[in-house]
Image (tube, helix red, strand yellow):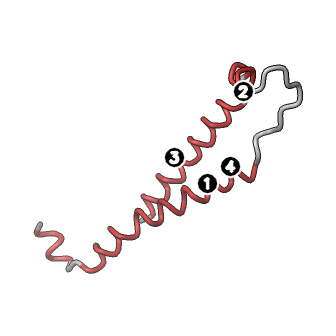
Amino acid sequence: MMESVVAAIAAGVIGVAVSIAIVQNPAVQNLIAPGVQDLPPYPLEAALIALGASAAVGVLAGFMPALVAVKVKVIDAIRY
């Protein structure tokens, strides 16, 4: 389960970094809002919500396989 959570958080960090790089790109800013001088900064709340959602998805994705693994007898898991 921990592997799933760590992978989801790592993917969330990469996703937030890519989104910041895209939004702060001058070419994209000129395309979206031509002539605007004061563009708002990237919202910290959005980044934190995205990381929280990523962690929640990792927990949900790792919970079901972990629950099944707990119910399997050790000898049966080794045999198959």
Q: Of the numbered discs in the image, which one, if any, rests on residue 47?
A: 4
Q: Which residue is mark 2?
A: 32
Q: Secondary structure at mark 3?
A: helix
Q: Of the numbered discs in the image, which one, if any, rests on residue 61?
A: none
Q: Which residue is mark 3?
A: 11
Q: Label 4 near label 1: C-beta < 8 Å?
A: yes
Residues at marks 2 and 3, CA–CA distance in whole angstroms: 26 Å
Residues at marks 4 and 3, CA–CA distance in whole angstroms: 13 Å
**Place of residue 25 in the rendered image (x, y in percent of width and height, measured from the top left):** 70, 25
Q: Between disc 2 and disc 3, whose residue precedes?
A: 3
Q: Amino acid at mark 3?
A: Ala
- Name above or below for residue 80 compared with residue 19: below
Q: Of the numbered discs in the image, which one, if any, rests on residue 51?
A: 1
Q: Secondary structure at mark 4?
A: helix
Residues at marks 1 and 4, CA–CA distance in whole angstroms: 6 Å
| Tally of numbered discs | 4
**Place of residue 28 in the rendered image (x, y in percent of width and height, measured from the top left):** 68, 24
The residue at the point 28 percent across, 73 percent down is: 69
Q: Amino acid at mark 4?
A: Ala
- Circle 4 residues within 10 Å: few <14, some 14–19, many ≥20: some
Q: Amino acid at mark 1?
A: Leu
Mark 2 or mark 3: which is in front? Answer: 2
**Place of residue 46 in the rendered image (x, y in percent of width and height, measured from the top left):** 70, 50
